[in-house]
Amino acid sequence: MRKLKRSRNRRRLRSVLRRGHLSVALGAVVLASISLTLLGILALKVYADHNLNLIARAISYTVEAAVVFDDKSAASEALDLIASTEAVAVAEIYTADGDLLAYWRRPESGLLSNIERLLADNLLEQPLTVPIEHQGRQVGVIIVSGHGANMLRFLLSGLFGVIVCTALSAWSALYFSRRLLNRITGPLHQLAEVAHAARSERAFDRRVPSAHIAEMDNLANDFNALLGELASWQSHLQNENQTLAHQASHDSLTNLPNRAYFAARLARTLRSLDQLSGKAAVLFLDSDRFKAINDTYGHAAGDAVLIAVATRVRAQLREGDVVARLGGDEFAILLAPLHNVADAERIASKIIASMQEAIELPDHINVVTSLSIGIAVYPEHGATPDLLLCAADAAMYQAKRLARGGQQVAESEYSAPTLSSGA
């Protein structure tokens, strides 16, 4: 539980990279915007100071004659003509003796004028004093204070441009950040999905697609190669397991199912037939001359006889029937489903007839053998696998006693012999 909670609290790589990258990108954009704003204000200050100096000099040239002749009316008209059209808040003209010759002041209108004046007071070097000269002699002086109307408009338009540029830069940073994140986290996400599928579903056939980044592509290629090796190992292990399972349930000589497989298959078949009220038959087969052939011609000849018997018996059965080697020269057959005893007797007859053809031994010696077959039918001759198999075994011995190479059906339900109390 604690491990699950820790895994839930952990942030994803995409989230970490996105936050880090966006923080750096937006920080750089904001820093650049602030720097551009400060540089713009500095440039605005230099420009406004220079412009105010030019206005003051223009006024000094214009009112020069009025100052020389001490004409207040002409000086006031000239001052009003220039100051009213320029960014001037207050303009004063004094004679060389310090007498006020002309005065002009821009009318103020509410809050905006206060903002403009405050802006001018903080950005401009004012009041600005410029001498009025005539023929190389100073005849007066002009004192000018700038007005912030033009500066406010320029500053607002500049700030608007900076805000727009900042927004565009932020959008660009977000766009390129997502592209970069997709290039980095996309291949990692695909790699994680393939790795999870390989771990949880054993889907070793899936592959990681190629990536645009060289390191990611190399990682994907190495991981795909590892998946290929794992798929090869899985296939090898599956083949080994199938081989071991086959060896555990089949006879190595005849490649027929062994006793354990036959017993399990018989038990499953009887359980299913018990639910369907069906019939099945067990045939117990024993070779009549196997011991004599084995003793006379050797074990290789005995093996050849067993292989031939297994092949001929299998050829007489239906697709769903089962034949197994129980051990030695004993075989058992499961016929299911079965309609009646006659069907089992007919198959037994075909098996007995197939043994009439001679069997060729390794030294080109031909021998003829026969099979004695006992038949037990479920449920008439036994209700359990053991009882049914024992009934077929007893019927086979009955067939041997009557005539070798024949068949015999169990007469009644078989019951295992019990020891009497006085034995």
Image (cartoon, rainbow, N blue to C red):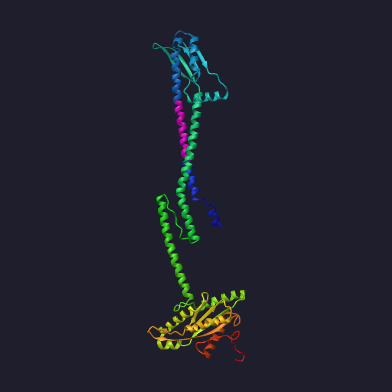
Q: Residue, x 51% and y 23% (percent of image)? A: 149
The relative height of residue 128 versus residue 243 in the rendered view (above or below) is: above
Span colored in magenta: 26-46
Magenta run includes residue 270: no
Q: Nearer the viewer, residue 51 or 190?
A: 190
Q: In the image, 402: left or right of 302?
A: right
Magenta run includes residue 29: yes
Residue found at the very far bottom of the displayed protein:
422
Can the viewer see residue 187?
yes
Query: How far from the left and from the top, in percent, is residue 246?
Result: 47, 73
Q: Residue, x 53% and y 90% (percent of image)? A: 402
Query: How far from the left and from the top, in percent, is residue 180?
Result: 45, 46
Query: How far from the left and from the top, in percent, is residue 216?
Result: 42, 52
The image quadrant where one finds the N terminus is: bottom right
Can the viewer see residue 101?
no
The relative height of residue 105 versus residue 369 in the rendered view (above or below) is: above
Query: How far from the left and from the top, in percent, is residue 45?
Result: 46, 26
Q: Residue, x 40% and y 51% (percent of image)? A: 215
Q: Nearer the viewer, residue 7 or 189?
A: 189
Chief secondary structure of the magenta span?
helix
Residue 46, by quadrant, is top left
